[in-house]
Amino acid sequence: MTEKMILDGSRVAGEMKETLKGRVEALAAAGTTPCLATILVGDDPASETYVRMKGNACRRLGIESRRIHLDRGTTTGQLTEAIRTLNDDPLVHGILLQHPVPRHIDERAAFEAIAIGKDVDGVTALGFAQNAFGFAAYPSCTPAAILAILDYYRIPIEGKHAVVVGRSPILGKPVSLMLLNRNATVTTCHSKTSDLPGLLRQADIVVAAVGRPRFIQGDWIREGAVVLDAGYNEGNVGDVDYDACLARASAITPVPAGVGPVTIAMLLKHTVDAAEKAAATAGR
Amino acid sequence: MTEKMILDGSRVAGEMKETLKGRVEALAAAGTTPCLATILVGDDPASETYVRMKGNACRRLGIESRRIHLDRGTTTGQLTEAIRTLNDDPLVHGILLQHPVPRHIDERAAFEAIAIGKDVDGVTALGFAQNAFGFAAYPSCTPAAILAILDYYRIPIEGKHAVVVGRSPILGKPVSLMLLNRNATVTTCHSKTSDLPGLLRQADIVVAAVGRPRFIQGDWIREGAVVLDAGYNEGNVGDVDYDACLARASAITPVPAGVGPVTIAMLLKHTVDAAEKAAATAGR
């Protein structure tokens, strides 16, 4: 029986926040309060919860959280207008549009309205490409969190075979490209993949980003693989059948307290990064 | 012995150009001559040849080819300035910066100077991301050529396992994302990949984009696989050991007369697309 490593995201996030505290204090002393604007459209309860969690995390660190809550009837034009107002506001350093937005809204158009310098969640096309080319200021938070966890626990990436399940523009695709930039060989799988278990059984590193509760089965995991679960489904359940996968993995993220807290810490870090840049530009 | 399909790029390109002819004539009748500006920096003989080939292909179709040749001492600032002049010129519809540029130039900065509406070679970060998200006006020409060949020969992509060897921003990465968007399962390999032969032997579709002559060996190819060779090395040699791979593949692109001519036809198509858009915007 090999020793198991539980990849404790709370611990990674805790250390990240500890570092951020000093930076926020230094900014405050120089007259800048980092500020993250969060935009919620409609009244999806899960989205409300996420936005509240992010706001609370900000406040605990001394980061201002400005919440914009638009009703579900908001049009794409009204939403992009609200985003542009935040782009122009020098007191706002980061903008997060909580997704999903109601179906009648063109989410891509809304994301694209976010100024690249305030795109702390890495959702714009330009931010995506900069990340794909390895020089993004703010890579998408969940992919960046996954890499941060691997690095924290000194899990080698170079030369490893990473299999990513999922191909969304803010998770599966960017994490595939980030692992590729770190010299992993990367296979990206999805709902049309023919032999998912067979491919997963070859993986040194598994990233689950499907949004289906307990989808990844224990016997799809190679003995000794590293499993990262970016899923977060109803009832605090990830995309991975945790107990079954734990039995075979050498290292695994739990849900909750795995990728989730690091994602939020990454969002805070990006907001502080943006505030520092703004303060430097303002010549303080 | 299975029947072999030689994927004849000259034929695909020929049909594409035939379609373009009528569109160029219609534009000419309405007073617009499509125009591709090509920029060559320095005096690399291979680059000079490529630029000349592209210019000749334009002229044969009635597309204007405007050649800008800058000496090898050109700075990044001078190059981006030249690009901006072309961006602002309403008679220019597409801009192609021949790469590689001399080492002292920041190639990424130069690419980024190209206006997205004239980025017919798909080299900007924004163009890359739009392609990754599946809505690019002008996907990178070589990846688009590879997809065009597969489609011309009605080779199914969905559910297939594609293995791409190479991860450059204008070839390996975009072709991986395009195949992914077409519902292939995609593995992207590179110089740090541990067991390249083993991975390639699982591939239904192999894309070679390494830039190493005859690098892909015959016994790395699964019986019946489809092999696309995007390499073009000195002496008219691709990245694939053609004869050895032909013996096992069900379909294969030759070099020359494989991906190359379709890449050029794609560049012409994008230029005509851009000219049509400009003409429509001008309200003709």
Image (cartoon, coloured by chain):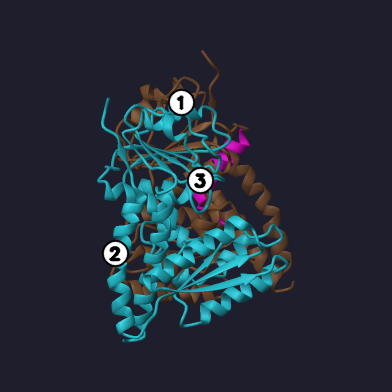
Chain colours: A cyan, B brown
Residue B255 place in picture, x, y as percent: 44, 36
Residue at 34% across, 76% down? A276
Label number found at residue A198: 1
Chain of residue at mark 3: A
Label number found at residue A236: 3
Instruction: Look at the image and say whether residue B140 sits in the magenta stretch.
Output: yes
Label 2, label 3: how many angstroms apart (C-alpha)? 26 Å
Query: Considering the numbered disc 2 on the image, is that residue within a helix, a strand or a loop?
Result: helix
As shown in the figure, which amino acid type bears the numbered disc 3?
Answer: Asn
Chain of residue at mark 1: A
The residue under label 2 is A18
The answer to whether dots 1 and 2 both sit on one chain is yes
Which quadrant is the C terminus of chain B positioned in?
A: bottom right
As shown in the figure, which amino acid type bears the numbered disc 2?
Answer: Glu
Q: Is residue B77 at all visible to an observer of this figure?
A: yes
Label 1, label 3: how many angstroms apart (C-alpha)? 28 Å
Q: Is residue B121 at all visible to an observer of this figure?
A: no
Query: Considering the numbered disc 1 on the image, is that residue within a helix, a strand or a loop?
Result: helix
Please tell me which of labels 2 and 3 falls first in the chain. Answer: 2
Residue B97 place in picture, x, y as percent: 43, 62
Near mark 1 (Cα within 10 A), the count class, few <14, some 14-19 or many ≥20, is few
Please tell me which of labels 1 and 3 falls first in the chain. Answer: 1
**Range of magenta residues:** B138-153
Q: Does B20 appear above or below B246?
A: below
Relative to the observer, which residue lies in front, A114 or B130? A114
As shown in the figure, which amino acid type bears the numbered disc 1?
Answer: Gly
The answer to whether dots 1 and 3 both sit on one chain is yes
- Image quadrant where residue B272 sits: bottom right
Query: Considering the numbered disc 3 on the image, is that residue within a helix, a strand or a loop?
Result: loop
Residue B267 place in picture, x, y as percent: 54, 54
